[in-house]
Amino acid sequence: MQNPKHELRKYLETLIHRFLNTKSLYQELKRIEAWETPGKFQTFKLGAGFLELSKYTLWRIFLTEMAAILSSTEQKSLIDWLQKARQHAPSLAPTRYNPNHSYPNRQAIKPQEYRTLIDAHISCLNTHEDLITRIKIHRDKVIAHFDKAYFDNPKKLDQDYPLSDNDITPLMTLVSEIFRKHHSCLFNQDPRMDLLILTNVDNLLRYARAFLRVRSDRALIRKGFKPIDYMHDD
């Protein structure tokens, strides 16, 4: 590595970008699933075929991306970045916010202290090793390859290697915090670890639900409102 300070910063930015997009996919998936509930399912049925296809696609992309980001064997991953950052801690020259420090209120972090932080993050990731393994198994057996046992019986994969929101949410929170911390140390910023999607599936389904309600409003229809007029292209 010729210029660790520059290369590892660029590497971190790329990983964060990949992770935030992946996290957004998972959040959209959860939003879609929230509409498959009593009181909302009628709206979900309007585009059930497309939404089911979207769920299928979002889930597979999520598994593929998370397996890569968290793998210890990938050439580029969070673990790989942490190991390289530990090795090149002096070159990275990390800092922390200190309001009592001279402008711009940043204080240098000693290399050994930064390595201790990295070791703590690796240790936290190791506590999720079983979950990360299950994510990679899902990726390997039904996405990267076709495992005969699970190809013939797809539900068996969820039985053998279950993945639940109760498992995934804490992992996503941990990865977000690790990325946030190192971005703060190396870029002097404390970013929000979410993409603010202003136009998401919730907005589309809320509009669809609103129109369904309007179509059922007999008082409006008696006054001359014609829902069909609003279903044509402009």
Image (tube, helix red, strand yellow):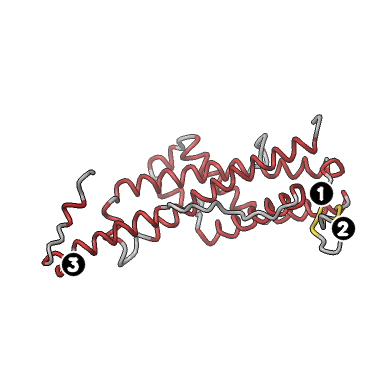
Q: Quadrant of residue 234?
A: top left
Q: Residue at x 69, y 38 (%)?
A: 11
Q: Residue at x 16, y 53 (%)?
A: 228
Q: Is residue 178 visible?
A: yes
Q: Quadrant of the N terminus?
A: top right
Estimate the spatial distance between the alpha carbons at disc 1 and disc 3, rounded to whole Å.
61 Å
Provide residue 176's location: percent of width, then percent of height: 63, 54
Quickly name the residue at label 1.
94
Quickly name the residue at label 3.
217
Element at badge 3?
A: loop
- Mark 2 vs mark 1, foreground winner is 2
Q: Earlier in the sequence, mark 1 or mark 3?
A: 1
Q: Amino acid at mark 3?
A: Asp
Q: Earlier in the sequence, mark 2 or mark 3?
A: 2
Q: Residue at x 63, y 45 (%)?
A: 16
The dot on residue 102 is 2
Q: Residues within 10 Å of mark 3 (few under 14, many from 20)?
A: few
**Number of marks present in the image shown:** 3
Provide residue 188's location: percent of width, then percent of height: 75, 51
Q: Quadrant of residue 42?
A: bottom left
Q: Residue at x 69, y 55 (%)?
A: 190
Q: Amino acid at mark 2?
A: Ser
When the figure is inspected, residue 85 is found, relative to residue 189, above or below; the finding is: above
